[in-house]
Each structure stands twice: as structure tokens, then as C-alpha cells.
Amino acid sequence: MLLRCGEIAPVGQVVHENGKMLLQAVLEGIGGQASRNLMDHFAEILFALNKQCFSYLSIWIKEVLQQEGFPSSRISPEQKETFSQQLLRERVNKRRMKEMVKEFTLLCRGLHGTEYTADY
């Protein structure tokens, strides 16, 4: 559906009206509210939003990440800003998007750099 948001007006309308809520739910999952094995799926949603609905995403991500303690209280405003900048720049390489999401979820969960996640 996200791949058609620029081509089909009704789909674009649905994305415009509900995309921010979708983004918030995805970021909550990345922030620790979902199993880590779902991160590739969340990365694909972010990649599709970025590729097909960039103008909306660039506004929504700033609004959503401004919330203190969202998506995790372990993340600093600087880390959120870095993640959003990297995310908005990556419109071609889906594998890189998946890597960014995995790294961000580890930061959100306080697991980045631990031996527990060495193979993740």
C-alpha cells in the first residue's frame, strides 16, 4: 500500500491521515515495545515511507521524536537527531536501513555494544 501512496489519490489520503500514527507505532516497536526479530519488518515500513512519502515522513519524524522519552528514555536528543537524519538520507539501500534500525533498537534497549548482542 505504501508503494502506491504517490500514484493513487485515495491511498495517498489514507497515508496522509494515518501515516504519523503508523510511524509512531513503528518507532514504539523499535524503541523496545516489540520483539527484536520484527526490526527488519519495521525497517521495510520506514524504507517505503521514506521512498514513497518523503515529504510527509520528514515532518512526522521530527514531530514524533520531539517527545521526551520517546521511543525510549535511554536515547538522547542527539541520538534521535542522528537516527532521523540517517533515516531520511537512506532512500536507496534497504539493507542499510535495516542496519540503522537494528543499531537504533539496541541503543533504545540499552544493549548497544554489549556481548549479548554481538551476533545480532
Image (tube, helix red, strand yellow):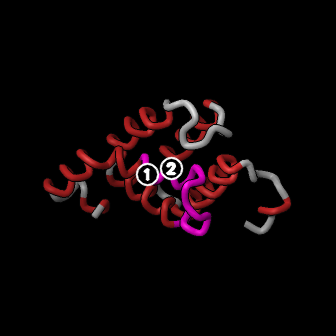
Residue 82 in percent (x, y) is at: 61, 37
Residue pointed to by mark 1: 25
Q: Residue at x 59, y 69 (%)?
A: 37
Residue 5 in percent (x, y) is at: 25, 56
Q: Tags 2 and 1 in contact by the CB under 8 Å rule?
A: yes
Is 45 one of the magenta-colored residues? Answer: no
Q: Amino acid at mark 2?
A: Glu
- Which residue occupies the foreground of this view, 1 or 21? 21
Q: Which mark is residue 49?
A: none
Q: From the viewer's perspective, is 57 left or right of 43?
A: left
Q: Residues within 10 Å of mark 2 (few under 14, many from 20)?
A: some
Q: Amino acid at mark 1?
A: Ala
Q: Residue at x 35, y 44 (%)?
A: 20
- At mark 1, the secondary structure is helix
- Which residue occupies the foreground of this view, 34 or 37? 34
Residue pointed to by mark 2: 28
- At mark 2, the secondary structure is helix
Q: From the viewer's perspective, is 65 left or right of 55?
A: right
Quarter holding residue 6: bottom left
Residue 39 in percent (x, y) is at: 56, 62
Where, quadrant-wise, is the N terminus in this rendering? bottom left
What's the distance in space between the residues labelled 2 and 1, CA to CA?
5 Å
Where, quadrant-wise, is the C terminus in this rendering? bottom right
Residue that extends furthest to the left in the rendered view of this protein: 10
Q: Residue at x 19, y 57 (%)?
A: 11
Q: Residues within 10 Å of mark 1 (few under 14, many from 20)?
A: some
Q: Which segment did they paint magenta?
A: 24-40
